[in-house]
């Protein structure tokens, strides 16, 4: 279904039961996903010490590797290591982490992902304050002439997707809105064609 759809990337959440209070799946499973999926993989590591798995993520043929700001005391080094491995480097912020914390790294990253729910579970309600954070991040990127894409993950559907596009987002991650829809391919097409 995903291969036949209009989606640009396949976003996968890896949870370790430590950084987030849940466990999803690991690299042996993702290896088969990567073999079957024709879309670029956007890998979101909701784990502590994500730098230990750069080679594994690279081994999947991932397009982007997203690490959490809160999980990386040496974020600048991790970003460089991801880029050296040939992947796009993304940094993710939890809902309570301010956008301003990125001011010294915004020109080094390829992507910033804002969590619009607390990471660890699907099907949560969108945190509306994320819209303010997207506007603030868009302003920072413009002012610093940075090229980072803005991605939002959590509670994205037709309605919140429209509001996010108006606020200046580049990439929408949708889980439940797609996979609980009666016609997932149609739902992806609708989300893809949201205009600000
Ligand atoms: Zn995610």
Image (cartoon, helix red, strand yellow):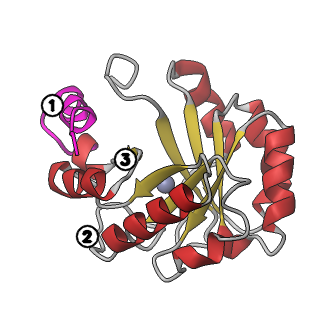
User: In the picture, residue 86 is in which quadrant?
Assistant: top right
In the image, 80 versus 140, the foreground residue is: 140
Give the structural element (helix, strand or loop) at label 2.
loop
**Dot 3 or dot 2, earlier in sequence:** 2
Give the structural element (helix, strand or loop) at label 3.
strand
Does the CB distance between marks 3 and 2 fall below 8 Å?
A: no
- The residue at 76%/59% (across/down) is 50
Image location (x, y in percent) of residue 2: 37, 26
Residue denoted by label 1: 183
Number of marks in picture? 3
Mark 3–mark 2 distance (CA, rounded to whole Å): 15 Å
**Dot 3 or dot 1, earlier in sequence:** 3
Residue denoted by label 2: 125
User: In the picture, residue 101 is in which quadrant?
Assistant: bottom right
Residue span colored magenta: 179-196
Q: Residue furthest bottom?
A: 96
From this view, report whether residue 87 is shown above or below residue 45. Answer: above
Residue denoted by label 3: 172
Give the structural element (helix, strand or loop) at label 1.
loop
Specify whether 43 is left or right of 175.
right
Which is closer to the viewer, label 1 or label 2? Answer: 2
Image location (x, y in percent) of residue 3: 40, 19
Residue 18 can be seen, yes or no: no
In the image, 46 versus 63, the foreground residue is: 63
User: In the picture, residue 70 is in which quadrant?
Assistant: bottom right
Note whether ligand 1 is within 8 Å of mark 2. no
In the image, 79 versus 65, the foreground residue is: 79
Please rate how many residues cluster around mark 1, counting C-alpha atoms within 10 Å: few if below 14, some from 14 to 19, many from 20. few
Specify whether 102 is left or right of 183.
right
- The residue at 52%/73% (across/down) is 94
């Amino acid at each position: 279904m995903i291969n036949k759809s209009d989606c640009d990337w396949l976003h996968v959440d890896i949870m370790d039961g430590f950084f987030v209070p849940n466990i999803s799946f690991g690299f042996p499973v993702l290896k088969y996903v990567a073999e079957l999926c024709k879309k670029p993989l956007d890998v979101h590591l909701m784990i502590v010490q994500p730098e230990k798995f750069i080679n594994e993520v690279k081994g999947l043929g991932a397009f982007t590797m997203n690490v959490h700001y809160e999980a990386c005391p040496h974020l600048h080094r991790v970003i460089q290591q991801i880029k050296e491995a040939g992947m796009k480097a993304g940094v993710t912020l939890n809902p309570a982490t301010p956008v301003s914390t990125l001011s010294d790294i915004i020109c080094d990253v390829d992507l910033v992902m804002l969590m619009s729910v607390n990471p660890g579970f699907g099907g949560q309600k969108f945190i509306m304050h994320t819209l303010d954070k997207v506007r603030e991040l868009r302003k920072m990127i413009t002012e610093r002439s940075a090229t980072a894409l803005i991605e939002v993950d959590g509670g994205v559907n037709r309605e919140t997707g429209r509001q996010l596009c108006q606020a200046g987002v580049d990439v929408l991650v949708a889980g439940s809105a797609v996979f609980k829809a009666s016609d997932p391919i149609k739902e992806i097409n609708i989300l893809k064609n949201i205009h600000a």
